[in-house]
Amino acid sequence: QVQLVETGGGLVQPGGSLRLSCVASGNIRRVYTMAWWRQAAGRKRELVANVTDLQVTNYADSAKGRFTISRDWDKHALYLEMSSLKPEDTAVYYCNAFVGHYTNYVNTYWGRGTQVTVSS
């Protein structure tokens, strides 16, 4: 079993910045791709950005140039630095990880989410 815990959400003014963190713990042999998803009220969950175990990154068009995804291998942690935030960035942000276990199987895990609200 693996747990993902997101932190760093909150209320931010338009144009402001925020840094989200996610830490994975539990039965982890290797963490492969990690990703940030978000879901705004009344909308489908969408991919914001991800990063593989080979440090290849991918960003949604809406995040390019404003968001930066990174990870800390020792801490099994994932980060999302957000700047120039817009009201349309308001959503619950979820951490996702594709994990290989010591028992030689893989699974995808989700965090509970952290609320980001961009409003004046």
Image (cartoon, rainbow, N blue to C red):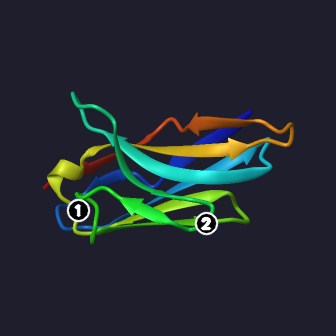
Residue type at mark 2 is Leu
* Residue that extends furthest to the left in the rendered view of this protein: 120
Q: Where is residue 17 drawn, in percent x and y? A: 31, 67
In this rendering, the answer to whether 68 lies above or below 44 is below
Residue 11 percent across, percent down from the top left: 29, 52
Dot 1: what SS?
A: loop
Q: CA distance from mark 1 to mark 2?
A: 28 Å
Q: Looking at the figure, which quarter contains the N terminus?
A: top right
Q: Residues within 10 Å of mark 1 (few under 14, many from 20)?
A: many
86 versus 66 height, above or below: above
The quadrant the C terminus occupies is bottom left
The residue sitting at 17% across, 49% down in the picture is 88
Q: Which residue is nearer to you in this view: 32 or 68? A: 32
Q: Nearer the viewer, residue 10 or 67?
A: 67
Horizontal side, residue 4 vs residue 114: left or right: right
Residue depicted at x 51% and y 35%: 112
Q: Which residue has dot 1 on it?
A: 85
Q: Position of residue 76 (x, y in %)?
A: 68, 57
Quadrant for residue 114, please give it. top left
Disc 2 residue crowd, few under 14, some 14–19, many 20+, Cα 10 Å: few
